[in-house]
Amino acid sequence: MEKQNLFTEEELAKVTDEAERKHLIECAQDKSKIDMKYMEIMSKYDLWEKGKRSRYFHATTHENAKKIMQDGVIRKGMDGGVYICKQPLEAARFVAIRGHETGTIFEVELEERKIVEAHDHNEAFFGCKAYMYMDDIPTAKIVKMSRYSTEQEDDKE
């Protein structure tokens, strides 16, 4: 059995139902198994905010960035999460590919337990893996905000 690294023994001991504990361990060993049942168990035992955190990047248009700051949250999409990448330029590619030459990148610090690899993007096409944070991202989790541009400046002679 593969070792899981998301939960401590103390956290797993809080999960009193054996089937729920088994499900958490399976998801920790293979994040592709994370489902709504996992989300419910995590909420039931208040395990979300206790784990390891890492920095990721979310890119969007300037207009959307303004709305995010006004609303106080990067809202999850219809598919249940917010798309993120491990590098800022990777995140910017997803906005640029949709025809936006400028945008805003949010650097966010997130709980690893809510992050899954997104398999709905072609890694070869985008040149990177995409991930999903399986919840809204409050602006309090934003560590840094940067503007970027992919526009090419004409060579001046």
Image: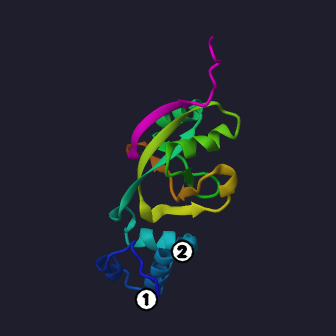
Identity, as a three-letter code, of the amino acid under mark 2: Lys
Q: Dot 1: few (<14), some (14–19), or many (≥20) neighbours within 10 Å?
A: few
Q: Is residue 129 left or right of residue 147?
A: right
In this rendering, the answer to whether 46 lies above or below 121 is: below
The answer to whether residue 37 is left or right of residue 138 is right
Secondary structure, mark 2, is helix
Identify residue for label 1. Answer: 18
Q: Residue 5, how many percent across, how many down?
A: 39, 74
The amino acid type of the residue labelled 1 equals Glu
- Residue at screen point 56% across, 46% down: 90
Compared to residue 72, the image places residue 66 above or below, namely above
Q: Which residue is mark 2?
A: 37
In the rendered image, which quarter is residue 17 located in? Answer: bottom left
List x then y, in percent, for residue 94: 63, 44
- State the SS at label 1: helix
| Vertical position of residue 155 compared to residue 75: above or below | above
Q: Nearer the viewer, residue 123 or 62?
A: 123
Residue for point 52% across, 59% down: 134
Residue 113: % across, % down? 44, 65
Query: Farthest residue toward the top?
Result: 157
Tell me, yes or no, whether the highlighted magenta stretch contains residue 154: yes
- Span of residues in magenta: 141-157
At horizontal 50% and vertical 43% (from top left) the residue drawn is 88
Residue 57 vertical placement versus 37 (above, below)? above
Judge whether residue 143 is colored magenta.
Answer: yes
Marks 1,2: beta carbons within 8 A: no
Colouring convention used in this rendered image of the protein: rainbow
Q: Check disc 2: other Cα within 10 Å, few if <14, some if 14-19, many if 20+.
A: few
Question: What residue is rendered at 43% in x and 70% in y?
Answer: 42
Q: Could you tell me how far apart the alpha carbons at marks 1 and 2 are, in whole angstroms?
A: 14 Å
Q: Is residue 28 left or right of residue 10?
A: right
